[in-house]
Structure formats: C-alpha cells, structure tokens
Amino acid sequence: MKLPSIFRGQRKVLLVEDDVALRTALADKCKESGFKVLEAGAADEVLSILGLEKPDVLVLDLILPMKDGITLLEELRMAGFQMPVLILSNLLGSHDLRADAERLNAAFYNKSSVSLEEIVEVLEQSLS
C-alpha cells in the first residue's frame, strides 16, 4: 500500500518528453503515485524549470526538439545536477546509447517494452 504524499513528503519528477500524449499519460500515472509533476516538451524548457524548481528525479526522452537528450544530460551533469535520471526512448537501445546512459549515471528503458506502472516503480526505487 502506498502512503499518501502528505505522509512521505511530495517528491518532484521532471518529465522531458515531446510526445504530448505520452507525457500526459505518464504525468497522470506519476500524480496518482504522489509525485508533483513538472513537464517540459523540449530541452530548452528544462533549464528554465531547473532555475525555479529542484526535481528529485528526471525522466528524459532522447529525441527532443533543438537538442538531443544525451547532450542535455551531459550539460546538466556538467552543471552539477546529480538527480537520478531515467532515459526513455523508442530507439532500440544500441550499445552506444546504453554506454552513454551508464556514463552519465542514468538508467535506459525502451518505451515500447516498459509500462507506465513499471516506469513509476523505477522512479520510486530511484528515490528510496
């Protein structure tokens, strides 16, 4: 049984996904699990959000407008952001992508082979 967020402190997740339908579905699932949800549809929105909010965990798509997710994550890590990161992509998870994710201390999951419930479970585990 999950405790209501009032008892465990509300955790913040930043969802960086340009597919609005997927981002909305994932946001709804995260809210059901007690997360405060921050959303961005492009890499350039992330820095603005991070200037105002401090998320506990980041969900990051690789294919984004203007800048890819790996480049964005490299920049965030160089700027000192060390929150757990879950990379979601429809790319098949080539060795290079998995190596990049590992190098940047992020977990890599294929969107088509993971459910919304599993994503939320991974987010919760990353914060425990």
Image: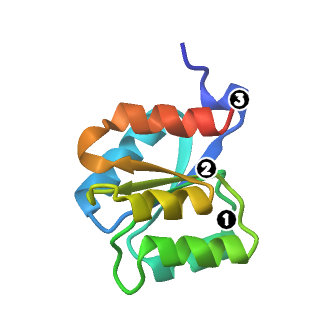
Amino acid type of disc 1? Glu
Find numbered disc 2 in the image and state the secondary structure of the residue it sits on.
Answer: strand
Residue 61 rendering spot, x and y as whole percentages = 39, 63
Q: Which mark is residue 53?
A: 1
Task: Tell me the residue at 38%/71% (across/down).
Answer: 41
The reply, left or right, for residue 17 in relation to residue 91 is right
Residue 17 rendering spot, x and y as whole percentages = 37, 64
Q: Are marks 3 and 1 in contact (CB under 8 Å)?
A: no
Residue on which disc 2 sits? 12
Of residues 58 and 93, the one nearer the viewer is 93
Q: Residues within 10 Å of mark 2 (few under 14, many from 20)?
A: some
C-alpha gap between disc 3 and disc 1 = 19 Å
Q: Residue furthest right?
A: 80
Task: Tell me the residue at 42%/65% (across/down).
Answer: 96
Q: Residues within 10 Å of mark 1 (few under 14, many from 20)?
A: few
Residue 37 sits above or below residue 53 on the image: above
Residue on which disc 3 sits? 8
C-alpha gap between disc 1 and disc 2 = 9 Å
Residue 36 rendering spot, x and y as whole percentages = 56, 47
Q: Residues within 10 Å of mark 3 (few under 14, many from 20)?
A: few
Residue 65 sits above or below residue 120 on the image: below
